[in-house]
Amino acid sequence: MSTPVCGIDFGTSNSTAGLFTGGTAKLCALEGSENTIPSAIFIDDDSTRSFGRAAVKAYTRGDDGRFMRALKSILGTDLARETTRVGTRQVAFTDILASFIGDIKSHVDAQAGQELTSATIGRPVFFIDGDKEADQNAQNMLEDIVKSTGFQNVTFLPEPLAAAYTYEDTLKKEELALIIDLGGGTSDFSLIRLSPKNKHKENRAEDILSNHGVHIGGTDFDKVLSLMCAMPELGHKGLMRAPFAEKDIEIAPWLFFTLATWPKIHTLYNQKTVRLVEDTLNHALEPDKLERYLNVLEDESGHTLAMKVEETKIALSASDAHHLDMNFVEKGLNVPVSNSQHLKPSLMDSCEALNRTVQETLDDAGVTAEQVSSIFLTGGSTKLPMIRESLLKPFPHAHVVTGDAFGSVGVGLTLHASRYFK
Ligand SMILES: Nc1ncnc2c1ncn2[C@@H]1O[C@H](COP(=O)(O)OP(=O)(O)OP(=O)(O)O)[C@@H](O)[C@H]1O
Ligand SMILES: [Mg+2]
């Protein structure tokens, strides 16, 4: 019997892992019977770590400790080389990420009945846009982290190609497919010739016509919606009297941008920021709003806010109006948010950038929209009707296939591992 191999989709928002056994690629249960795990970590003040839904639960019930999510976005950046304070200790991010991936590995190993040593790991087409060196650093950093958990043989595959292989496994004839993977951190695209005949071919280079991607995803949609609807309630765009200036000036926007950015929220939880906000409060024209900001800092409830905004975005993908629940900030604070007035306008710029990236994917391959026979959709953000419709518009004749939004990449990585580590 050959040694089992696995594929790991370490996502910005959710992760999966698959095991190739008995001739098929299957996702593993990573938390109870769930085969997805939120990419979330909670470290309590005694240094005990919890992951996924358990981490979200520990944080939302108010345990003392540090919560982090969307840490994939910091790979390759200076933030990834830093440490964060948990209780009285400083902990390195790379160590935190290793414990999360180590937790995934322990579940896969348990299901395989042995310690796995070989894995295909997913990666966005670009970890970092327009900077090859930083992009390579991000992959190297992830490789070191994965190897530190006990894997010895590691290879990387662009996430949309993994989804392509999952789709290819269902095909009866050749197709020229555009794969669209809209995740939490990045949007990735592959244009590839898929066929049941070629799927076991060792080298697919001539079938892969182009891979492209952009650092825009669901966490960015949360950010713009938060800046539009939640942050103004905490003082964003408010004015303050400046001691030596003639005119009132705007309260430092970075305070609100950072609080609205998933992977950066925890960087605000320190005495320096608290003192700055206290000082600003004394000069603010609307101190009540900034008082709310201070409460969020002191309660470390920035992620609760991010989750409420995300919930609102998801609710608005199915209905036109919703209330952003900010009761945890101040009793009775509910902000009405609608699709037409808030979500749609907030997504406009991202939508344009995504359409441009799809066009570039076609241009890179020298293919026209009419030549694309099918489109395979995966990733949680494909559930947003506005984005989905806008991306599909140039392809009125293509056959549109909606894949498993959260599992297609993990299965494809596992298929790849079974072929690569033969
Ligand atoms: N029904 C929905 N409507 C809108 N967005 C949704 C919906 N369900 C999930 N999402 C969004 O999808 C994103 C997560 O998708 P997914 O799990 O595919 O990302 P990921 O694989 O973790 O990220 P990446 O591939 O970028 O690293 C989140 O931003 C989430 O808010
Ligand atoms: Mg993904």
Image (cartoon, rainbow, N blue to C red):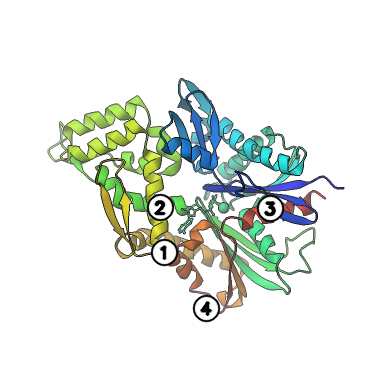
Marks 3 and 2, how far apart at CA: 29 Å
Q: Which residue is mark 3?
A: 413
Name the residue tied to disc 2: 311
Which residue occupies the extreme front position in the image?
33
Q: Which residue occupies 58% across, 30% down? A: 95
Query: What amino acid does circle 3 point to?
Result: Leu
Q: Nearer the viewer, residue 321 or 200?
A: 321
Task: From this view, report whether residue 93 is shown above or below residue 362.
Answer: above
Viewer-nearest of labels 3 and 1?
A: 1
Residue placed furthest toward the right: 1
**Residue at mark 1: C-beta within 8 A of ligand 1:** yes
Callout 2: few (<14), some (14-19), or many (20+) C-alpha neighbours within 10 Å?
some
Please name whichever residue, 28 or 88, is drawn nearer the observer in this view of the structure.
Answer: 28
The residue carrying pointer 1 sits among few (fewer than 14), some (14 to 19) or many (20 or more) residues within 10 Å by Cα, namely: few
Instruction: Give the alpha-carbon distance from disc 4 to disc 2, as whole Å.
Output: 31 Å
Query: Looking at the image, is mark 3 or mark 4 nearer the viewer?
Result: 3
Q: Nearer the viewer, mark 4 or mark 1?
A: 1
Q: Position of residue 256 (x, y in %)?
A: 32, 42
Q: Earlier in the sequence, mark 4 or mark 2?
A: 2
Question: What amino acid is at disc 4?
Answer: Pro
Residue 366 coordinates in the image, percent (x, y): 61, 70
Q: Which residue is mark 4?
A: 396
Q: Whole-Å distance between the Cαs marked 4 and 1? A: 23 Å
First in sequence, mark 3 or 2: give its number: 2
Q: Helix, strand, or loop for circle 4? A: loop
Q: Measured from the top left, where is residue 308 in percent x and y?
A: 38, 48
Report crowding for label 3: few under 14, some 14 to 19, many 20 or more residues within 10 A (C-alpha).
many
